[in-house]
Structures are given as C-alpha cells and as structure tokens.
Image (tube, helix red, strand yellow):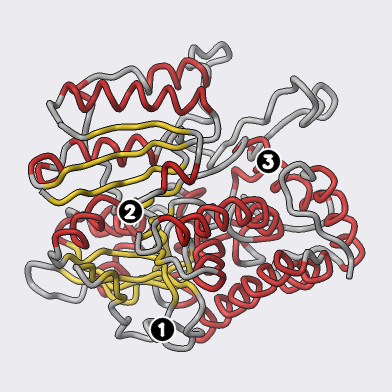
Amino acid sequence: MKKMKVTLVGAGSLSFALGALQDMVLSDRLKNQVDLEIALMDIVEENLNRTYKYATEMFSAFSHPAKITQTTKLEEALTNANFVIVAIEVNRYFYWSQDFHIPRRYGSKQIYGENGGPGSMFHTLRNLGPMLEIARTMEKVCPDAWMINFTNPEAKLVEAISKLTSIKIVGLCHGLDMGIDQISQFLEMDREDIGVEGGGLNHFGFFTKIWNKKTGEDLYPLFDEKEKKADRLAQFDHIGLSRTMYRTYGYYPYPGTNHIGEYVSYAGDFYAGLSLQYRYDPIREELWEKDSRVPDFIYCASGHTLDKGLFSDDMTEEEWIEETFKFDKDKVHKSNEYAIPIIEAIFFDEEIQLNSVNMQNNGAIKGLPDDMVVETQAIVNGQGIKFVPMSVELPTAIIGTIHIQGTIHKLLLEAFVEQSKTKLLQAILLDPQAPSYYQACAMIDEMCELQKDILPKLEWK
C-alpha cells in the first residue's frame, strides 16, 4: 500500500482537529488502502496531549491501523507530509475581544471583527507570521504537499500564502453550506434536493442560482414568494441583514449577519445582539488584566442566550472541554467538512465537486482580480483543485465591495512585509467601517501596544 502522511498543525483545536480525526477514522479507504501516518502538532503541549489521547483511543476502538505521532516541533511534524491541515489560533477570545472593542472605542462601526473591519486586520497580522512559518517549513521538508487551511481570516491568509510562498493552498469554510440551510428553510425543502451556484469573498458570498436537483426548476421565483411571506422578525439576528441584502441586490447572501455584516457599513441596524458581543461591565470588570475574565462571546441574540435562568447550570469551559475529549465511540460521526474528501480525491485521483473553496481567482469570478483569493465551487481530482467558473456575474455593487477588500488584502501584505503602520493605516482608512484619520492612528498605536507580544513589530514610515 502507498504511504500517506497527514499532519494536523494546531492539533489542540477544539473543533477542526477532532472533526478531521473522526473523518479519517471513519474512512474505509484510509483504513484499508493506504499506509496512513497522522502527525499531531501543537505548540501547547497540554492541548496536544489531550488530542493525542483522544485520537489513540478512537483509532484503537475502530481497529484502525494508522500510526499516530505527536510533537511540538513543526519541522518534525511536516517532514514528508502529503497533506497539512492547519487550524491555529492563540488565546482566541482574549484577542478577538480586543479586535472587537478597541476599534469600536475609536469610532468604528464594525461588528464581530474576525474577518472584516479594522479588527480583522490585527487578526490577520497576528496569524500571518505563524502561517508563513508553516508554509516556509513546508517548502523545505514537504514542498509538494497541499496545505488545507481552516484558520481565519481565511481569504487574507490564503492570499498571503499564495503570493509569498510556492505552497499549494486551499482554504475551507462551511459558510456556503450554512446559506443552503437557510434557503432550505425558506423553501421548506430538503437541502439535499437544492442545487446552487454561489460565490464571492469568504463570509461574503451570494447565491446566483438555486434550482431543484430533481426537476431542474429554477427555485428563485418560489424563494422570492416565500421570503416575502416569512415572518419579518424570524431569526432576525442571523438573517435579517441577509434578507435586506437579497431585496437590495437580487441574490441571497451567506452565511449570515455576523459575517456578511463585517464588510458593509450598515450592518448594525440589523444586529440586535451587537451589544452582547464580548459584553462586560466596566464598573465591575477590568478587561485583559492578569486573571481577569475574558468576556463571553455571544454570536447573536438567539440560541437560548437571552432566556437563561438566573442561576444557569451551563457547563464551564473546562467542563465542556473535558466532556468534548471524553471518547465515546457512539458519538463519532462525520464532520461534513471538506478536508478529508479533498485528501481522498487527490490521493486516489477520483473527481468530486465541492460547494466552496478559497483560492486565487484566476477568472472564476468575473470582475475580480485574478490573484485575489475568492470563494466558489471547485472540482477536485488527482491533478489538484480547480474552480468551476461562476456562470452568472455578481452585481456591480457586490463586485465593488469585494474589490475594496482585495485592495485591503494587498495593503496588509505590504504592511507585514514592510513592517509599516502607515500601510496598515491605509488599509484601515479604506474599510467601510473605518474610524476617522486621527482615531485610526491612535487605534493602531493602542492595538500594537496591547498585542505587542503577538503582533509583528510595526513602525510609522
């Protein structure tokens, strides 16, 4: 049997790492047709040990012969790898809460701040250094391997790796599939019966076609009828902005307010839960000090966020992690992520089509630069991954919004390479959620000081 080595960088991840491991253990092909090695790598030894224990228990329970190793050394983990799955983030909510609060203190109207808005630019600069270290180590010890990235900001990081290294990279996200779920609810149809064409920027995509897979019928007329009849406040926090954008631009967007709203200036009007994001009381709490509480992340004002009892018995984070990593064979299931299907399609040269991947455009979406990383459908086989060009052009207003983000991508790369606060300022001032000039300059200085242990050293030039 041919050997295959899959490396998980960020193996201590609470979501993507476990999903990838479960997908591999459930794959008959990876069990019976390859000599599989799985290398787990993380810089936090405690988290690495936790994942290694779970993985070895699971693979043993399924009588899977894969060799599983663990290491905190990147080069050792990557040597001779065929595929490298990357999901990295340091002190996730600690820094994300800073990305959210500080720009808003200086006048930005951003929401979330993970992938768009000024906050996302600091997020990008924090993760770009480690991502480049991974890619450049791959150039040295596994130059032909594919990097399969789950790390955000997805589009910005994948574009940086594509432009600054020779590594083959694809970015994955389930945002488009979330949009299909929403469409299926409006249409009152099974999602498996709905065909789509969609794309744009990661977390800012639009469905240009929806159809009935069984009959070929165009479903947009029915969707339009159903959307008009639907309760106007239903799931408002999640899809209120989506419905407004549909009426404005003619195509339904994905994945939802908290993401698509990062790229426009008017999202706050459609986000009732905005004041809940990383909520804290400044009278009682000091943020980000030693031993202080990191504000709880609230995605939206739903999902039992507002109807909890006064003395909730919810699990603590520590209890939740302990429960998550308590192996139970009956709870092992496929993740529905695309990493392992991509690995199998490339390795065994069997063609599959995926709903969405993130790569350099190269003409797949008309009106956008070829070297910009975009998101749309793709074909995967032994030759690699190739976009399926969108047959319908996106509206001019949407193309224009995405173009702005493409320019921001370039300026962030220049800021990183040139170690320039000035280039970062240019990127921030271009964003639809930018503060004023003076506020932007002060915000950059404060964020660079606040996150100096993890941001690259930038100077005014």
170 with respect to 4 (left or right): right
Upstream in sequence: badge 3 or badge 1: 3
* Residue 332 coordinates in the image, percent (x, y): 22, 29
The quadrant holding residue 77 is top left
Secondary structure, mark 1, is loop
Amino acid type, label 3: Tyr
- Would you name the residue on which mark 2 appears? 83
- Would you name the residue on which mark 3 appears? 95
190 with respect to 113 (left or right): left
Amino acid type, label 2: Phe
Secondary structure, mark 2, is strand
Label 1 Cα crowd, 10 Å radius (few <14 / some 14-19 / many 20+) = some
Between disc 3 and disc 2, the foreground one is 2
Amino acid type, label 1: Asn
Quadrant placement of the C terminus:
bottom right
Label 2 Cα crowd, 10 Å radius (few <14 / some 14-19 / many 20+) = many
Query: Residue, x 60% and y 65% (percent of image)?
Result: 263
Spatial distance from mark 3 to mark 1, Cα to Cα? 34 Å
- Would you name the residue on which mark 1 appears? 362
Upstream in sequence: badge 3 or badge 2: 2
Query: Residue, x 76% and y 69% (percent of image)?
Result: 418
Upstream in sequence: badge 2 or badge 1: 2
Spatial distance from mark 3 to mark 2, Cα to Cα? 29 Å
**Is there a contact, CB below 8 Å, between mark 3 and mark 2?**
no
- Report the front residue among 357 and 206: 357
Image height of 286 relative to 361, above or below? above
Image height of 62 relative to 120, above or below? above
Between disc 2 and disc 1, the foreground one is 2
